[in-house]
Amino acid sequence: MIIFCGQSSATTDITLQLKWTHQFQFAGYYMAQQQGFYQAAGLNVTILPADPDNPDTFSNVLSGQAQFGVAHSGILQQRIAGKPLVAMAAILQFSPYCWMVKKSSDIFHPRDFADKRISSISRKENAELLVMLERSGIQTDDLPAYAGDSSSEDWLAGAIDAMQVYVTNEPYTMREQGIDHRLICPQKYGINVYSDILYTTENMLRQHPQEVEAFYQASLKGWRYAMMHMDEAIALTQHQYAPDRSFAQLAYEAEVLSDYILPAGTNLGAMSIAKWRLIADLYAIEQSAFNQAQDGFIYQYAEPEKINMSWMLIAAIIISLLSIPLYLRLMLRKSV
C-alpha cells in the first residue's frame, strides 16, 4: 500500500520483498535504510525476508503486497509469459549457483557428469546449471535426480555425486566442517546470467514514477555504501537482520559476493539487452518472443543532471589556467 501524508512533503510507504532470508546478500538495502537514504528520498521502506519454503517473490509484487522485489534471472521468463515486470538493476552480475562435488570425486568438468547422481533443480530458477552440462554433451533428463529434503546429508553420505549450492552457503558450512570440496560454476564456462535483480511492475512505474526513481537511486546508494564500508555492513546485517549468522560467516559471504557485485569494468547494477538476449537463449526463448517482451523490460533511470557552469565559473577556470605559467616563472626567478 502506498500512503501519502504531510502538507509540504510526502512520505511513501514502500515494501521490498527479498528472495531469501536475511543475510549479507541484501546488505545494500539494509545500509540504505540505516544511513537514511530511503528516508531522505521520502520513502518509508519495509524490507521483508522470503519464506524459505516458498521463496517466490513474483506473486507478492504482482499482487501489490510489495512494490519492489528481488528475483533471479527467471524474471525474463515471467516477462515472456505476459507478466508486467520491469528489471531495474542486477546486483549480481553472475549466477551464484554452482555444483558442489567432493574433492575425492572424479568430476572436474561439466562433461564428467555423465551417469552421475545430482540434486533435483528447477529449470525455471537455475537453468544455467543444466545448460552448462548440456553444452558439454550431457543429457540432463537422463541423470538420476535426488528430490529429498536432506540433500546435504545425502551428499556427505555419498548418495548423490553433485549438489546444487549457493556459492556462499553450503561451501562455507563444508569448509567449517573440514570437508574438502570443489565447485563447478557456470561462470567459469562462459555462462553468465544476472541474479538478485531488483524489479518492480509496469503499473508501479506508470502510476508512481518519482517513487520508483527515488527507490532505485537510494538503493544503489546503499549498495555503494555497503561495498565501501564492508565491516560496517556486515556488523549491521548480523546485529539487526541475521543474528543467527556469525560475523565470520557473513564476512565470508561478503568477500565472495563482492566479486559478483562489482566485477572489474562493470558498473553497479548494470544490465544490457545484449546479455539478456544471451540469457533468453539459455531459456530457449525464441527471438520473436524476446523482441516482443524487451520493450520496457529494462528500467530507464533518470540521467544525472549535467554540470551547468555559469560564465563566471568558466572565466575563473580560464584565468586560473592562464595564471599557471606566470606563477611558474615567478617561482623560477626566486630560486635563481
Image: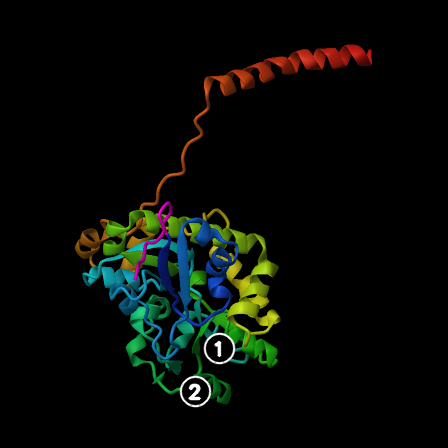
Q: Give the image location of residue 67, x and y in percent.
A: 31, 60
Which numbered disc covers residue 101? Answer: 1
Q: Is residue 279 magenta?
A: no
Q: Is residue 151 left or right of residue 176?
A: left
- Is 15 placed above or below 35 here? below
Determine the residue located farthest toward the right in the rendered image. 336
Inspect this view and state whether residue 191 appears.
no
Q: Amino acid at mark 2?
A: Ser
Tell me which label, 1 or 2, sits earlier in the chain: 1
| Quadrant location, the C terminus | top right
The part of the image, by quadrant, that contains residue 245 is bottom right
Please give the name of the residue rendered at 55% of the width and 63% of the height, measured from the top-left corner: 254
Task: Judge by depth and name the residue closer to the eye, 315 or 112.
Answer: 315
Residue bounds of the magenta highlight: 1-10
Q: Secondary structure at mark 1?
A: strand
The part of the image, by quadrant, that contains residue 93 is bottom left
The part of the image, by quadrant, that contains residue 75 is bottom left
Q: Amino acid at mark 1?
A: Val
Disc 1/disc 2 C-alpha distance (Å)? 16 Å
Disc 1 versus disc 2: nearer the observer: 2
Q: Residues within 10 Å of mark 2 (few under 14, many from 20)?
A: few
Q: Give the image location of residue 133, x and y in percent.
A: 36, 70
Q: Give the image location of residue 285, x and y in percent.
A: 22, 60
What type of secondary structure mainly makes up the magenta span? loop
> Which residue is under mark 2?
150
Please give the name of the residue rendered at 29% of the width and 68% of the height, measured from the top-left corner: 60
